[in-house]
Image (spheres, rainbow, N blue to C red):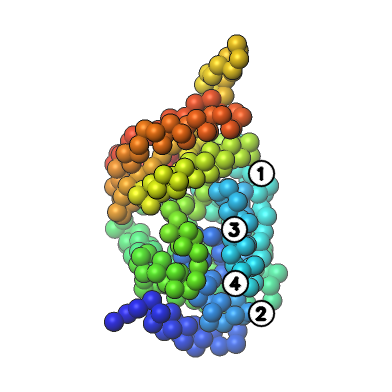
């Protein structure tokens, strides 16, 4: 019988054997997989682990601070936070094509991560939060069996020039097992059971060109939506929920004047495997509350819409 505690014990032994007294580098994203790897490796090898957390400016509200709080402050993990918001914004400037934006964000991440890694001396291993479905997906992609719809950056995304050996303690595990490991390792429940968040982050939730002004509005709108979902006990009844920034101006009446402001779309879906999904039938009262709060609290938003498209043919993300 495999319990989370046993898997952890087993992996700790394996990691210690593989790594010895050498040093491991990990790209910490704040997502479940890399978080669990960080907690596991910290338990296995302590200070021989250094994490690099790249803040690309496209994260959810307060996400960067929360990652530092959890890992650096509470757990004592060595984490280097790189504030790269301006660099990402500069690189994305003028680019409106979704796949091109994904490539820019992926490549910039690699550049920043590489530059940071080069500053750390004596690293022999690179840890990754690869899980079993990633292994399958990338194998399928290599043999051309999978129709690769979007460029993901989980497996094999890091440069080969970084001649580091890989440490991938989650390679044989499914997501639900990884979550159980996370809880067993003492990670906060809310972090372990958080909805998935795409690698390119808000970069693909701001339609078209990414601008800081848009990202800031979107972060606030998204935080309101998620907060109200939690309050209404709907967060865990949906598989993924988020706000999308639509760079179109729509009219709103303020006093006796007409003001043209941005539009926010809300997306919430129920799904088992993220291959197909049904739009979540959220209560009207909840949608009403979220909409009122977003329009009243956020300058620059005049209208909120709810996405009632299912996948297929609509994808979960808007880009
Ligand atoms: P779609 O939009 O294809 O999304 O229905 C399915 C799942 O994949 C996530 N997604 C991404 N994750 N990089 C990622 O790491 C990406 O470029 C990307 N695009 C979509 C999406 O959030 C959903 O969970």
Label 1 CB less than 8 angstroms from ligand 1: no
Residue 305 visible to an observer of this rendering:
yes
C-alpha span from label 3 to label 1: 25 Å
Residue at 29% in and 58% down: 145
In the figure, residue 229 lies in which quadrant? top left
Q: Which residue is mark 2?
A: 122
- Chain-order first, disc 3 or disc 4: 3
> At which x and y percent is residue 183?
44, 69
In the drawing, what numbered circle is on residue 66? 3
Q: Nearer the viewer, mark 3 or mark 1?
A: 3
Residue occupied by mark 1: 90
Q: Earlier in the sequence, mark 1 or mark 4?
A: 4
Relative to 186, 147 lies left or right: left
Give residue 75's mark.
4
Dot 2: within a 10 Å radius of its alpha carbon, few (fewer than 14), some, or many (20 or more) residues? Answer: few
The residue at 60%/43% (across/down) is: 92
Rounded to the nearest angstrom, the CA distance separating label 1 from label 2 is: 32 Å
50 in relation to 302, above or below: below
- Whichever of labels 1 and 2 marks the residue nearer the N terminus, that label is 1
Q: Nearer the viewer, mark 4 or mark 2?
A: 4
Q: Earlier in the sequence, mark 2 or mark 3?
A: 3
Disc 1 is placed on an element classified as helix
Q: Nearer the viewer, residue 106 or 85?
A: 85
Q: Quadrant of residue 70?
A: bottom right
């Amino acid at each position: 019988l495999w319990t989370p505690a046993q898997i952890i014990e087993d992996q700790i032994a394996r990691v210690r054997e593989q790594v010895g007294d050498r040093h491991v580098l990990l790209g910490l994203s704040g997502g479940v997989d890399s978080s669990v790897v960080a907690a596991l490796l910290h338990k296995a090898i302590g200070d021989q682990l250094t994490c690099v957390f790249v803040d690309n400016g496209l994260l959810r509200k307060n996400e960067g601070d929360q990652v530092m709080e959890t890992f650096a402050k509470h757990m004592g993990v060595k984490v280097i936070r790189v504030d790269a918001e301006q660099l990402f914004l500069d690189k994305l400037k003028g680019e409106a094509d979704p796949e091109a934006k994904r490539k820019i964000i992926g490549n910039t991440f690699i550049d920043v991560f590489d530059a940071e890694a080069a500053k750390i001396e004596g690293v022999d291993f690179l840890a990754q939060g690869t899980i079993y479905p990633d292994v399958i997906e990338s194998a399928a992609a290599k043999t051309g069996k999978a129709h690769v719809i979007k460029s993901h950056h989980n497996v094999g995304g890091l440069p080969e020039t970084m001649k580091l050996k890989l440490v991938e303690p989650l390679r044989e595990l499914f997501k639900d097992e990884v979550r159980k490991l996370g809880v067993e390792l003492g990670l906060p429940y809310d972090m372990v059971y958080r909805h998935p968040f795409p690698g390119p982050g808000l970069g693909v939730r701001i339609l078209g060109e990414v601008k800081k002004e848009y990202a800031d509005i979107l972060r606030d709108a998204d935080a309101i939506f998620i907060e109200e979902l939690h309050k209404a006990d709907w967060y865990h009844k949906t598989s993924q929920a988020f706000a999308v920034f639509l760079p179109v101006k729509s009219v709103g009446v303020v006093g006796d004047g007409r003001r043209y402001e941005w539009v926010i779309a809300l997306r919430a879906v129920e799904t088992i495997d993220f291959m197909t999904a049904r739009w979540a039938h959220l209560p009207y009262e909840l949608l009403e509350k979220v909409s009122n709060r977003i329009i009243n609290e956020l300058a620059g938003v005049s209208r909120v819409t709810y996405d009632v498209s299912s996948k297929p043919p609509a994808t979960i993300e808007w880009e």
